[in-house]
Image (spheres, rainbow, N blue to C red):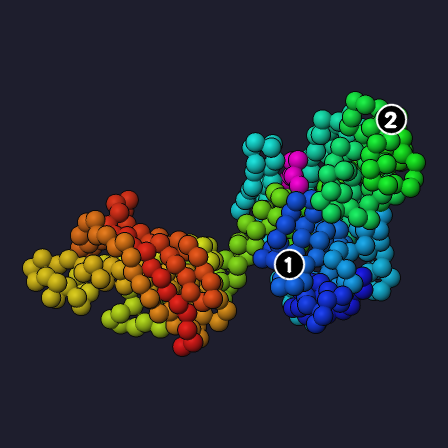
Amino acid sequence: MTFRPAPANHGIRFVRTDIAGSPSVIADIDHVVDISRGTTLQQGEARVHTVEHVLAAFAGLQIDNMIVDLDNNEPPIGDGSAKPYVDKLLEAGIIEQEEDKYYLEIDAPMSYSEPERGVDLVVTPSDDVRITFLIDYKSPALGTQYTTLQDLNTEFVEEFAPARTFCFLSEVEQLKAHGLIKGGGLDNAVVIYDSDLGQVEVDRIQTALNLKERAFVGKSGIINDVKLRFYNEPVRHKTLDLLGDLFLIGVPFKGHVLAARSGHKANVALARKMRELYKKKQIAKRYPSNGFFLDIQSILKIMPHRYPFLLIDRVMDLDPEKRVVAIKNVTINEPFFQGHFPGHPIMPGVMILEAMAQAGGILLLNAIEHPETKLVYFMSIDNAKFRKPVTPGDQLRFELDMLSFRRNTCKMSGHAYVGETLVAEADFMAMVIDR
């Protein structure tokens, strides 16, 4: 593995130099394809396994841009910690680049949990990165362990980077059978004894894995009585893994993460939620509004429609590529009320669908880059139903969910409400073209 400097705003990219054309994969949550035991990234032919320790090194040293050349499908394991990578990066030296650094600032608590497994992750506002981690495996060798990382600058290199990976003896064969831990041994992992068979089980696994070094049941509950680098090394390594997985957000964050019994699956799930928040904040930053997610001035920058055909007044909420909530204030001044119907004004159903489609256009346009240069063409409307008339004075609330998005074509499901009453619904198919 070779670390090479990269320009500002490049991010972290792994390059597979052993594959023709040297394909690469960017290290972000959109390219995570497997979390069975470590974190695996893939983009096209480029697939890289077990990236979390390398990414933890970048996160801990606060490195934003790097090219990582690999001549195989995963980084060398070293001693099972992030220390070998950290040592090399510090030896090479780190420079500050000219571009401004953007942080994802957590301004309201967010969480992810798996109640059936007792896994909980909570992120609360903080002026910097902080992590509090708790594990309580049912093992005498581990018991309940706790740690807190409060300052990357003063604690990461010495207190967390050296913490080695660990696993239970009962897991080793299964990991090997799945093609993992090919470079694994007793010199790069802390193996916890969790069998009732004594030395017989250790001998069996040693033979099955063809381990050259002698293995025995340690008095400490750790195979070969390997000495821990810290009294709570396992939970420190879990903190290291969490740092690496959250690096996949694609931007450094400021927040306090409280984790209980978390692993790669939960870490990556939280990273996805934080990535969605980041995208949302980027849109809000691009189109600043007066107290709402998108006000009419921001909508005018995005939408090509103008009077009398702009039918969205405000966007209340937007989860990029997922969901949008928009408002249309219906007044007697709408031009269609002059003829629909004189003396009995009712908003035409086709106009409700048009307004709903415009809300969907905002959702779709913000799933791509440079939305102001694009147009949305609607290809089909299915399952349209009109439940109740809409009249002057009503406020229409449109809620649309993106069902799929492939090759600039998407499917959306939309509902229109007045208050809590459903007044219309429909499914849309649309495509994005250059304006």
Residue at the spot 60% in from the left edge and 32% down from the top edge: 117
Q: Of the residues under marks 2 and 1, which one precedes in the sequence? A: 1
Q: Position of residue 261 (x, y in %)?
A: 66, 35
**Magenta span:** 258-263
Kind of residue indicated by mark 1: Gln
User: Which image quadrant: the C terminus?
Assistant: bottom left
Residue at the spot 63% in from the left edge and 50% down from the top edge: 34
The quarter of the picture where residue 375 lies is bottom left
User: Which image quadrant: the N terminus?
Assistant: bottom right
Label 2 close to label 1 by CB (< 8 Å) = no
The quarter of the picture where residue 170 lies is top right
Report how far apart the C-alphas of labels 2 and 1 lie in the structure. 40 Å
- Left or right of 418? Residue 201 is right
- Mark 2 secondary-structure assignment: helix
Q: Position of residue 426 (x, y in %)?
A: 29, 55
Residue identifier under label 2: 199
Kind of residue indicated by mark 2: Gln
Residue identifier under label 1: 42
- Left or right of 379? Residue 50 is right
Q: Position of residue 276 (x, y in %)?
A: 53, 54
Spot the residue most to the left. 343
Residue at the spot 82% in from the left edge and 49% down from the top edge: 183
Indicate whether 392 appears above or below 37: below
